[in-house]
Amino acid sequence: MKKKYKLIRGAILGVVIASSTPTIVQAQNNGVNISNASSFLRENAKELFDGLVDWSANVDEKINDHVVDPIKEKISSTSLFEKDSLWLIEKKGALTEEETHYFFVYKDASYDKTYYYDIYHNEVAKDSPEVAFTFTKEMYFSVTNLAADSFLKLIYEDRRGGVNYVNFTDMIDNEETLSVSNGKVGDFEKQYVRYQDWQQMFNLDTQNEKISIDELNECLAILEENYQKEHSDLVRRR
C-alpha cells in the first residue's frame, strides 16, 4: 500500500508556494511603474515566501500524489545516500525553540515552478515580450527531518536590471559566497546557507562514497552542539 505523508511546517509550506497562483504579488496596472525590485521584495517578503492565497485543495492533492509523495517515499526508504547527492543546509534568522539549525537535503529530486511578470508585476505568459521579472520557487526535501524541513530556494530575476535576488548563500571553501550569476541576497522572509562541500567539515571515511542516516544525524548533532557553544559564548561576552 502506498504510504501517505502528513506534510507539516516547512514541507507543506514548500508545496503550497510552489503550487499556488501568486496573486498576492500581482500589482494592478494603475499607471505606477514598480521599478525598484529590492523595494518590492522588501514590502512583499513574507507574502512571496508564504504564498498562502488562491490555491486549490485538489491541485495540492494532485501534486502530493504525483510529485511529493513519491519523492518522500523514495527518501524514507533509503538507508544509504551517495554523499555527493546531498547538501547541508543551515537555516538563518530567528528560529522557534524546537527548530534545529541544520539539515541535509537530497539534491537530485526537487519540485520547482517559475512565474513571469511584466513591469507592473502582473503575471504574464512565459513567452510574452512583456516579461520583466521571473520568480522561481524550488523545494528540496530533507533526508534527516522529512516531515518538518525543506530547503525552499527562491530566485527573483530582474531582467531589466540584470540582477538575481536570492534567499540563500553558498559556503564554498569556508567562504560564504553567491553562486548565482549577478546575484544579491533579497529581503525574503527565510534565508539559508547551502554547504555544497560539507564533507570536509567532518571526519568521514573518504573511501566510502555512501553515508547512512545515523551518520548524517551524528554530523548534525556535532553542528548543533557547536552552534550552541558559540551562541552561549556570545551571550556571555555581552
Image: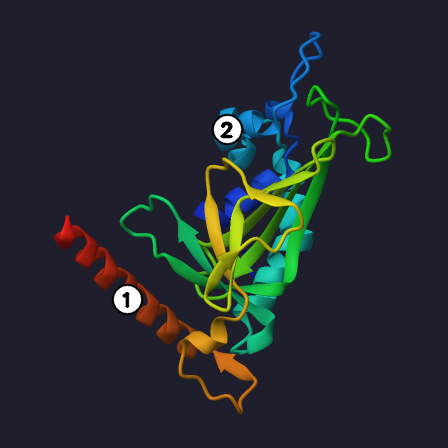
Query: Which residue shows up at 59% across the image and 24% down it?
Result: 24
Image quadrant holding the N terminus, namely bottom right
Relative image position of residue 164 (x, y in whole percent): 64, 41
Res 202 quadrant in image: bottom left
Disc on res. 211: none
Secondary structure category for the residue under label 2: helix
Drawn side of residue 78 relative to residue 234, left or right? right
Drawn side of residue 219 relative to residue 38, left or right? left
Query: Which residue shows up at 53% across the image and 68% down it?
Result: 76
**Closer to us: 21 or 126:** 126
> Which residue is disc 1 drawn over?
226
**Closer to us: 106 or 116:** 116
> Which residue is disc 2 drawn over?
42
- As drawn, the residue found furthest toward the top would be 30
Secondary structure category for the residue under label 1: helix
Drawn side of residue 118 relative to residue 55, left or right? right
Relative image position of residue 237 (x, y in whole percent): 14, 53
Gap in angstroms between the C-alphas marked 1 and 2: 32 Å
Res 67 quadrant in image: bottom right
Q: Can residue 1 be seen in this view?
A: no
Question: Of callouts 1 and 2, which one flags the residue occurring earlier in the amino acid sequence?
Answer: 2
On screen, 12 above or below 134? below
On screen, 6 above or below 33? below
Query: Which residue shows up at 64% across the image and 51% down it?
Result: 180
